Amino acid sequence: SKGGIKSLESSLASFVVEDVEACTRLLISGKERRTVRSTNMNAASSRSHTIFTMVIETADQAAGEPGQPPPPPLIKAGKLNLVDLAGSERISQTGTTGAGMLEATKINGSLSVLGRVIGGLAEGSKAHIPWRESKLTLLLKDSLGGNTRTAMVANLSPSRICVEDSIATLRFATRVKKVKNKPVVNEDPRD
């Protein structure tokens, strides 16, 4: 952690859970670890992106032939990313300084790369998509252009001071809507 900013490596954790309650406890624990800071624009401004990923597997045992060993179970897997992006900020409006300014710079940088990735995918570009230019886009690669169904919730502010940000958010959401994924069922027969 440099200057109050958590690195990706210090923030990643993986757990195996077997019920909804354990999963909910992890989600709450992650929410409590989020970094928030007061700015001129927001009393509890998110100072980091948050990604909560669940990989869900089910095993179906097919009926075998009488007198034969049972066939291996059929494993179906799905992945759910719940993503809370910190909003982009104009440092002049938020009044952030020091560590807060460094956080805002990193947030804006990763959102800029995300915008370029979404733009390339939305246009169906065969050109290079800059997945690796940001840890955020690298982590979200499957959700953005892979084997998934993706939904986005765009949060807007009714405040007059935020009109430009709300319009930018709507434009971004429109580009996200143009991204076409081709999800298929993931099945893996295991011994």
Image (tube, helix red, strand yellow):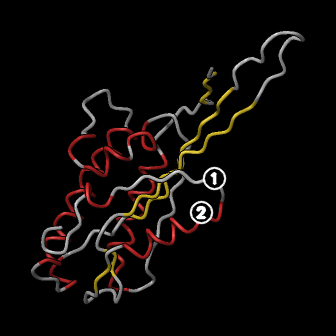
Count of marks placed on residues = 2
Q: Residue at x 30, y 68 (%)?
A: 48
Amino acid type of the residue tagged 2 in the rendering: Ala
Seen in the picture, residue 8 relative to 71 is either above or below; the reply is below
Q: CA distance from mark 1 to mark 2?
A: 7 Å
Q: Quadrant of the N terminus?
A: bottom left
Which circle marks residue 22 in the picture? 2
Residue 100, percent across and down? 17, 78
Q: Secondary structure at mark 2?
A: helix
The residue furthest left is 98
Residue named by callout 1: 18
Q: Quadrant of residue 158?
A: bottom left
Q: Residues within 10 Å of mark 1 (few under 14, many from 20)?
A: few
Q: Residues within 10 Å of mark 2 (few under 14, many from 20)?
A: few
Q: Quadrant of the C terminus?
A: top right
Q: Is residue 4 left or right of residue 178?
A: left
Amino acid type of the residue tagged 1 in the rendering: Glu
Which circle marks residue 98 in the picture? none
Residue 117, percent across and down? 31, 44
Q: Residue at x 84, y 21 (%)?
A: 63
Assess whether mark 2 and mark 1 are in contact (beta carbons under 8 angstroms): yes
Q: Residue at x 23, y 49 (%)?
A: 134
Q: Residue at x 28, y 73 (%)?
A: 47
Q: Is residue 167 left or right of residue 22?
A: left
Q: Is residue 99 left or right of residue 137?
A: left
Q: Quadrant of residue 75?
A: top right
Report the front residue among 26 and 180: 26
